[in-house]
Amino acid sequence: MASPEVQAMILMRQSNILAHSEPGLAVDLAADAADLIDGRDPGRLAASVARQQALAALHNGDERSFYRHAAHALDLGDIEPVEDDRAPYAHAAYVASDVASGYLRLGNPDRALELLTDHHAQWTSQQHRDRAVADMRLLHAYIAVREYRLALVLADTAIPAYLSAPSQRARRHLARAGTLVRQRRRSDSNSVLQELAGRIKNATQGVIA
């Protein structure tokens, strides 16, 4: 029989898959995963499960539970991996990136920006795709808070990184950033905003320039 950690990992992944289509079930699966490792020493899996509990709660329309689980996940983000850790990737920056996506979804880009910038230097070269996702979320957050010049500077590295390792998660935030830019341009002739619009449009078409 599989260990509690392996079972928890499977349930966590199932929760992630079902979060959009069956959020109530996703909440239950994530809770079951948390119960399986309660009182054990699963390393970073604990942070990853708490992160999934937060995201599942958000998809289920439960903001209070999102905040509670998100805070718990962030508290666990500095845990070191253990032997045979089922989520060694779930360090502080990874957890913060996913939690930040929740804050962006809730219309709180300031908190998302804080989380993403605080952990921006913690990514490793082995996590190229996950860092590209985090940078797209950061680009989205910069634009949301009208830090257009910082967004443009970030775009120099974030867009090539995304194009070299595309993912649905990163593409989603690129699209949302593009929507924000288009909306803002209707009433703002800022040249930096116009340049951002061009960069984002090209990126959605697979072009760096």
Image (cartoon, rainbow, N blue to C red):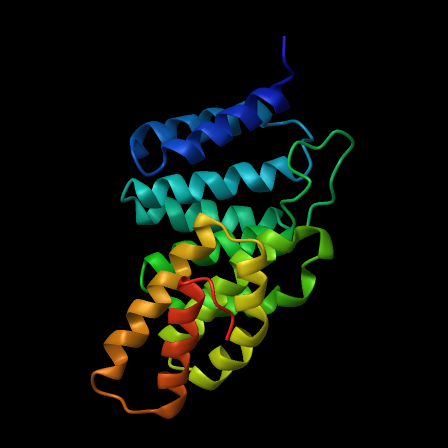
Extreme residue in the left direction: 186
| Residue 103 image offset from top left, x and y in percent | 39, 59
Nearer the observer, 163 or 74: 163
Of 123 and 107, which appears nearest the observer?
123
Q: Quadrant of residue 102?
A: bottom left
- The location of residue 179, given as percent across then percent down, is 29, 68
Residue 142 appears in the figure: yes
For the point 45% across and 31% down, which residue is it? 30
Left or right side of 186 for 80: right
Q: Is residue 9 above or below residue 63?
A: above
Say whether residue 7 is left or right of residue 80: left
- Above or below: residue 51 compared with residue 39: below
The N terminus sits in image quarter: top right
Left/right of residue 124 with respect to residue 201 in the rendered view: right
Of all residues shown, which one is farthest toward the top? 1
Image location of residue 15, percent across then percent down: 43, 31
Q: Residue at x 50, y 31 (%)?
A: 12
What count of labels does the image hold? 0
- Expressed as whole percent of the image width and height from the top left, the position of residue 185 reads 26, 83
- Left or right, 58 with respect to 163, comes to left
Residue 110 shows in this picture: no
For the point 59% across and 68% down, the residue is: 118
Quadrant in which residue 65 is drawn: top left
| Rendered residue at 71%/33% (across/down) | 85
Camera-side residue: 98 or 62?
A: 98
Location of residue 46 (image quadrant): top right
Q: Pick out the residue farthest to the right.
A: 83
Q: Quick one: 146 or 75, which is closer to the camera?
A: 146
